Image (spheres, rainbow, N blue to C red):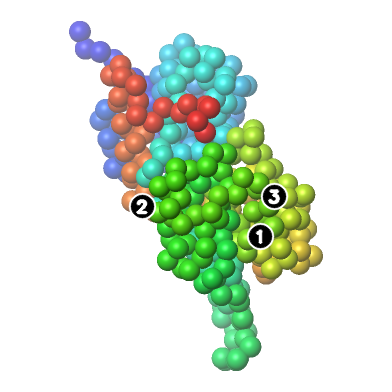
């Protein structure tokens, strides 16, 4: 008897090599047009699919999962962050969730470093000056930014990306400080020459650059609240390549406009793809469209991970990247 291939619904367009392999291995339903799926389309998908492959743009909440058919056993997320998936409801319905860690660590750390440099050295502003035809030539006091060598970096969340950032930061002469739920192993602290701050509040008050690198969970929602942002020094900058929801965006915007914080580099926003219109007016904010992991190599590696997770799961084994709620 020929076993039926599992129906895998992929919500967005993935790299071609991944889609080809997806079609070879499974009964794959692809999204060639790449239009984000509506809630109704997601509901239709979970009713039928054996496996759903969503991305950060799909809200797989309790209302969607309430319609999950008996076949849906795996949500193989294309991406590391799984805050758009209701993990508790998935677990209660016996649905396994996997993600794609590791393969986007270095790219995201690169982008974080790029934002730190961009904001400190006014890269985006300088680019705008040239394009607008406003450059009248070199001047000794023109476009002065701030040196990052010798400054203090405070990393909020010392996971894979936080550590990859710390390694880069060392090379740029930044001293590394971090806050994490758990202190990292002394060997890692030594390698990264990182100083642990048990109190996030105290770290915020002592560093020149704050980088958000923790996952978005109920515990980290608005972790950088208005109160905490006010603890930062007026010359300090904030960069966020994790999730917009971790920072109180309206409070940050107000403080940037009032000069209470010197600058911000944001790759993520609280209500993507919407961006607070007041942020758009600020010269001291560098804004990117959630492209921290956007490399061809990274996206192919992420797709590979998705394939491996699905294949392992449908073959009856525990997929390598099963998401375990408490460990996020
Ligand atoms: C991905 C990300 O591009 O993996 C993550 O958590 O934030 C991004 O880098 C996106 O999530 C893909 O779904």
Q: Earlier in the sequence, mark 1 or mark 3?
A: 3
Task: Measure the alpha-carbon separation of dots 1 and 2.
Answer: 37 Å
Q: Which residue is mark 2?
A: 296
Q: Earlier in the sequence, mark 1 or mark 2?
A: 1
Residue under the point 65% across and 48% down? 200
Secondary structure of the residue carrying tag 1 is helix
Residue under the point 31% across and 31% down? 308
Give the mark count: 3
Q: Residues within 10 Å of mark 3 (few under 14, many from 20)?
A: some
Secondary structure of the residue carrying tag 3 is helix
Q: Give how far across and how far down residue 268 sits, in percent.
A: 59, 50
Residue 74, relative to residue 215: is it above or below? above
Q: Which residue is mark 1?
A: 206
Left-right relation of 309 to 140: left
Q: Give how far across and how far down residue 220 sits, in percent.
A: 63, 39
Q: Which residue is mark 3?
A: 201
Quarter holding residue 72: top left
Q: Earlier in the sequence, mark 2 or mark 3?
A: 3
Q: Residues within 10 Å of mark 2 (few under 14, many from 20)?
A: few
Left-right relation of 111 to 237: left
């Amino acid at each position: 008897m020929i076993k039926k291939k599992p129906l895998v619904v992929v919500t967005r367009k993935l790299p071609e090599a991944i889609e080809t392999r997806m079609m070879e291995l499974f009964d794959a339903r692809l999204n060639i047009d790449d239009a984000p799926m509506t809630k109704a389309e997601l509901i239709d998908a979970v009713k039928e699919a054996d496996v759903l492959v969503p991305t950060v743009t799909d809200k797989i909440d309790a209302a969607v999962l309430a319609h999950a058919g008996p076949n849906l056993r795996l949500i193989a997320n294309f991406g590391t962050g799984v805050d758009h998936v209701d993990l508790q409801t998935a677990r209660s319905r016996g649905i396994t969730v996997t993600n794609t860690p590791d393969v986007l660590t270095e790219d995201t750390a690169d982008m974080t470093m790029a934002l730190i440099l961009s904001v400190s050295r006014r890269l985006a502003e300088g680019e705008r000056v040239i394009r607008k035809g406003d450059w009248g030539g070199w001047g000794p006091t023109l476009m002065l930014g701030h040196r990052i060598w010798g400054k203090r970096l405070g990393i909020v969340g010392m996971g894979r990306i936080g550590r990859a950032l710390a390694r880069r930061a060392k090379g740029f002469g930044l001293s590394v400080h971090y806050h994490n739920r758990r202190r990292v192993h002394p060997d890692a602290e030594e390698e990264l020459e990182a100083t642990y701050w048990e109190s996030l509040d105290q770290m915020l008050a002592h560093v020149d650059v704050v980088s958000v690198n923790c996952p978005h969970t109920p515990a980290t929602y608005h972790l950088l609240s208005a109160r905490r942002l006010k603890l930062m020094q007026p010359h300090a900058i904030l960069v966020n390549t994790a999730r917009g929801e971790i920072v109180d965006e309206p409070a940050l915007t107000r403080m940037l406009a009032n000069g209470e914080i010197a600058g911000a580099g944001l790759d993520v926003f609280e209500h993507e793809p919407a961006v607070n219109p007041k942020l758009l007016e600020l010269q001291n904010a560098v804004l990117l469209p959630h492209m921290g992991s956007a490399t061809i190599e990274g996206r192919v590696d992420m797709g590979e991970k998705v394939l491996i997770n699905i294949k392992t799961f449908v073959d009856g084994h525990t997929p390598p990247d099963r998401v375990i709620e408490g460990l996020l």
